[in-house]
Image: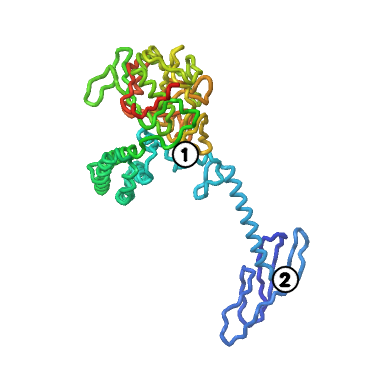
Amino acid sequence: MAFPLSASIFSPNKLSLNLSSTRKSTSSSFTTHFALPYTPREPASAKHISPEFKCILARKDDGPMELVNGSNYFSNLETWLVLGRKQFERAFAASIIFLQLMSPVPWTGYESGFIPPAEAVLYSPETKIPRTGELALRRAIPANANMKAIQDSLEDISYLLRIPQRKPYGTMEGNVKKSLKIAVDEKESILSSIPAELREKGSVLYASLIDGKDGLKSLLESIKDKDADKVSVGLASTLDTVAQLELLQAPGLQFLLPQQYLNYPRLTGRAVVEFAIEKGDGSTFSPEAAGQPRNIAVIQVVLDGYSAPLTAGNFAKLDKDTSNLVQLLQLTCTQTVMERGARCKILGQDNSSQHDEIVVDGAYDGVKLNCTDQAILSDTAAGKEKGYSVPLEIKPSGQFEPLYKTTLSVQDGELPVLPLSVYGAVVMAHSEVSEEYSSPNQFFLYLYDKRNAGLGGLSFDEGQFSVFGYTTVGRDILSQIKTGDVIRSAKLVEGEDRLVMPKES
């Protein structure tokens, strides 16, 4: 009995096909919508009969229907389907690539290889810029690789603690156990990286890191208790111990300065400068906890010679030579000094000489500060710009030494070890003569605000200035500084032994 078999497909030749076949069998008739041979189940004794396709009614393009031999067409049906599928896959892949190249945001589940470097950096959730001075300074220490592995594992807990509601205490516990294992297994490597004269102090710190009140074992117990506040406090103390050990492992610079800069002052480690600020209008600063209102407030900044030895050295030299870096420094406020994306410039005269000695006494008397919503900027009085005009000095993250006279391209993925995008960053302004140099003595304290930052929370001026330290004590004072306030004194209270002065010719 004959029966119809129909199908329609898309092919490169735009054929519309109607297929018919004749079934030589006594079985009942059937109909299918697939253009494939069909063999119904038959008794074992039945003779197997293959289907025969007699003819095909085919129409090519817009021509008339023709009755042609269908065996050749049907035998190539599978080939047509495969070719059509491959063409579809090629077209689909091409459309995906086109959309990926044109889209400013990476697609979830796809690699970011097609995204320009700037977008890859700014949109990457893995880009963890330090948001506190303590964290930035800790990361800048060139310490033993094992200590850095411990530090990285513990710092990850800080991000895990930010997760609301159900915190991943199991992951935190794994991080601490990993750090503890490294500390125990690599004890010899950790202690041998400390100079012999400091090794006894290092051994005490190492023991505290393992078994101390604020050590790794104690932190592990806090995590098991699932007390987030206790974990946060213990973690801060443990990381402080880690930083102290790392500082012992880095007694000096890990690189050689370029020959042309050997006659500059340089700081070969860390130093601390203390500022005393007095309200100029007779008002007071906010009282400390359970304290009285204060006419004078104290802030401390840590200078990092590991990442900016020349810039920090010049700044420390000013403190050391004058005993009072800034005496009776009047503060004034303006909204025009540092607009979004603008560069900080010296408002007074700039001394183009790179090697003028500073005035030992009273070099900064009466010098004003200009402040904006984003920075507190010193303004040196005309005729008193003394010090060294240090070249722009920025150490890129992941690099062994700083770059000089070169800014970083954040758009290309370059980020500094000491980022500007931290509240209380201590930064040298640009020289008025050339942006390849920093001012001999004009600095500013950066008041980072995420609301005024760009994509990724980065300052618009990130990688453009020489950052050489951070405010670590009295950050709350910065926002209280008003027009007319006075910096009574600034003195180098720690790190004078790490300040290397140039040899007098």
The residue tagged with tag 2: helix, strand or loop? helix
Residue 253 visible (yes or no): yes
x and y percentages locating residue 205 in the rendered image: 27, 41
Q: Nearer the viewer, residue 453 or 400?
A: 400
Lateral position of residue 91 relative to residue 373, left or right: right
- Residue at the spot x=35%, y=21% of the render? 320
Disc ID at residue 399? 1
Lateral position of residue 499 relative to residue 412, left or right: left
Height in image: 284 above or below 13?
above
The residue tagged with tag 1: helix, strand or loop? loop
Q: Amino acid at mark 1?
A: Gln
Dividing the picture into quadrants, the one containing residue 218 is top left
- Residue at the spot x=50%, y=28% of the render? 260
Label 2: few (<14), some (14–19) or many (≥20) C-alpha neighbours in 10 Å: few
Dividing the picture into quadrants, the one containing residue 38 is bottom right
Height in image: 67 above or below 388?
below
Q: Which residue is mark 2?
A: 72
Which circle, 1 or 2, is nearer the viewer? 1
x and y percentages locating residue 258 in the rendered image: 49, 32
Dividing the picture into quadrants, the one containing residue 83 is bottom right
Classify the position of the C terminus by image quarter.
Answer: top left
Q: Are marks 1 and 2 in contact (CB under 8 Å)?
A: no
x and y percentages locating residue 504 in the rendered image: 43, 21
Q: Amino acid at mark 2?
A: Asn
